[in-house]
Image (tube, rainbow, N blue to C red):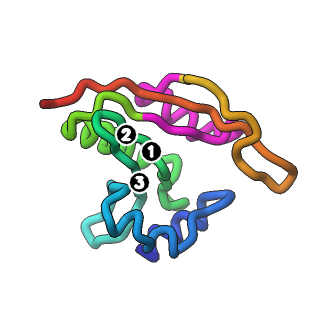
Amino acid sequence: MPTMAEIERATAIHPWSLNQFLGSSLRENEYSLVLQEQADGEILGFCIYQQVLDEATLMNIAVHPDRQGRGQGRLLMDCLLRQLSSQGVSRCLLEVRRGNLGAIALYRHVGFIDDGVRNNYYPTTSGCEDALLMSCELVPEQ
């Protein structure tokens, strides 16, 4: 888990702490994890999601800074959406900083649409930034 926390610190404006990664949420299966690893076990990226019945919410996603811009985020999202579909999930939700244009482009590319805005949601150094709410309809595999 420390490697995930290191990736998070290197990529996020307000990163999750190591305690959040090691805390009870992941241990007690409140959240689930998708890892993208190399053959040597080096973590390239991860997503953390929460599933409730046939709906899932993407809670966190990060790709190692050295691997960004090479399609790793798309591979990770494709893997996540296939896994959710195989688990019977029909809809995936997320929220993203309105200013995170790279992430928004990725989400739209894999099928997410805009659902709304949560005003002044994310703290910044100069105030707050809106969250864009997005969702993707999936065809559950049963």
Q: Residues within 10 Å of mark 3 (few under 14, many from 20)?
A: some
Identified at 29% across, 38% down, the residue is 53
Q: Amino acid at mark 2?
A: Ala
In the picture, measured across the screen, residue 48 lies left or right of residue 115, that is left
Outermost residue, left side: 142
| Mark 1 touches mark 2? (CB < 8 Å) | yes
Q: Quadrant of the N terminus?
A: bottom left
Q: Quadrant of residue 129?
A: top right
Q: Which residues are magenta?
A: 93-113
Could you say which disc has been placed on residue 72 in the image? none
Residue that badge 2 annotates? 56
Q: Report the residue marked by disc 3.
A: 48
Query: Which residue corresponds to mark 1?
Result: 58
**Looking at the picture, how far across and down is residue 113, in whole percent?**
50, 23
Q: Where is the C terminus found, in terms of image quarters?
A: top left
Residues at marks 1 and 3 touching, judged by CB atoms closer than 8 Å: yes
Q: Quadrant of residue 11?
A: bottom right
Q: Nearer the viewer, mark 2 or mark 3?
A: 2
Q: CA distance from mark 2 to mark 3?
A: 10 Å
